[in-house]
Image (spheres, rainbow, N blue to C red):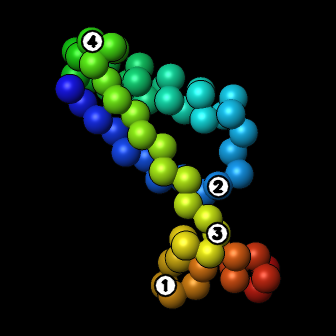
Amino acid sequence: MPIAHIHILEGRDRSQKKKLIEEVTKAISSSLQSERGKIKVLLHEVSEDNWATAGVTKREEKIVD
């Protein structure tokens, strides 16, 4: 049973997340020849305060830009 964990920034709407889940499921099913019903996709939404690169959060990046 394949399980995909995907971390994304908060802010996507329900339809965007649904499309992502559908496309990831399709890709896993195709590449691993796995039954779609056995594929799990878990989205982890992360706030801009909890997502950082090189010690700078996404929120701080927006302030600097």
| Residue behind mark 1 | 54
Helix, strand or loop status at disc 2: loop
For marks 1 and 2, give the CA distance. 20 Å
| Residue behind mark 3 | 48
Helix, strand or loop status at disc 1: loop
Say if mark 1 contacts mark 4, CB within 8 Å: no
Q: Amino acid at mark 4?
A: Glu
| Residue behind mark 4 | 35
Residue in the foreground of this view, choosing between 40 and 55: 40
Q: Residue 16 location in percent, x, y? A: 66, 34
Q: Is residue 29 left or right of residue 46?
A: left
Task: Choose top left, top right, bottom left or bottom right for residue 64.
Answer: bottom right
Q: Amino acid at mark 1?
A: Ala
Residue visible at 54% across and 32% down in the picture: 20
Say if mark 2 contacts mark 3, CB within 8 Å: yes
Task: Choose top left, top right, bottom left or bottom right for residue 47.
Answer: bottom right
Q: Is residue 52 left or right of residue 61?
A: left
| Residue behind mark 2 | 10
Task: Choose top left, top right, bottom left or bottom right for residue 5.
Answer: top left
Helix, strand or loop status at disc 4: loop
Would you call the spot at circle 3 few (<14 residues within 10 Å), some (14-19), or many (20 or more)? Answer: some
Q: Nearer the viewer, mark 1 or mark 4?
A: 4
Could you tell me if residue 30 is visible in this image? no
Residue visible at 71% across and 51% down in the picture: 11
